[in-house]
Amino acid sequence: MLVYTVPAQAKQDAVADVAAAVAAEALRVGEQAGLPLHRFPLEKTADAHAAVEGNAVGKVLIDIG
């Protein structure tokens, strides 16, 4: 998805809408939803990329905080 040309306010609104959907449990993720989460620290970004290329089932996430 290309978001570089989307106005800042539209992006902020989208983030707020997704956060509200997650808080309302409308968007389910994780093992219980059939979408396992594979987390990698920022310094293991190459490993996360390899997981995607290796067809990991679920979501591959990079923790940056």
Image (cartoon, rainbow, N blue to C red):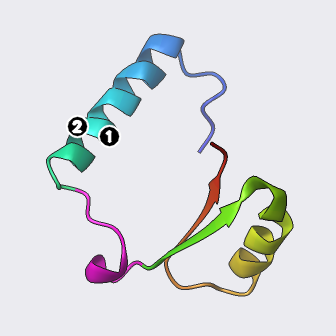
Q: Which residue occupies 80% across, 73% down?
A: 47
Kindly report the distance in space between the C-alpha atoms of the residues bearing marks 2 and 1. Answer: 5 Å
Residue topped by disc 1? 18
* Residue 17 pos. (x, y %): 28, 33
Q: Which residue occupies 73% across, 87% down?
A: 54
Along the line of sight, the residue nearer the viewer: 10 or 31: 31
- Residue range highlighted in magenta: 27-35
Taking the magenta stretch, the answer to whether it contains residue 23 is no
**Image height check: is 43 above or below 14?**
below
Quarter holding the C terminus is top right
Give the SS element for disc 1.
helix
Give the SS element for disc 2.
helix
Inspect the image, locate mark 2, and give the three-letter code of the amino acid beneath it.
Ala
Mark 2 surroundings within 10 Å by alpha-carbon count, few (fewer than 14), some (14 through 19), many (20 or more) = few
Taking the magenta stretch, the answer to whether it contains residue 33 is yes
Mark 2 touches mark 1? (CB < 8 Å): yes
Query: Which circle marks residue 20 in the picture?
Result: 2
In the figure, is residue 39 to the left or right of 53?
left
Query: Which circle marks residue 4 in the picture?
Result: none
* Residue 19 pos. (x, y %): 31, 38
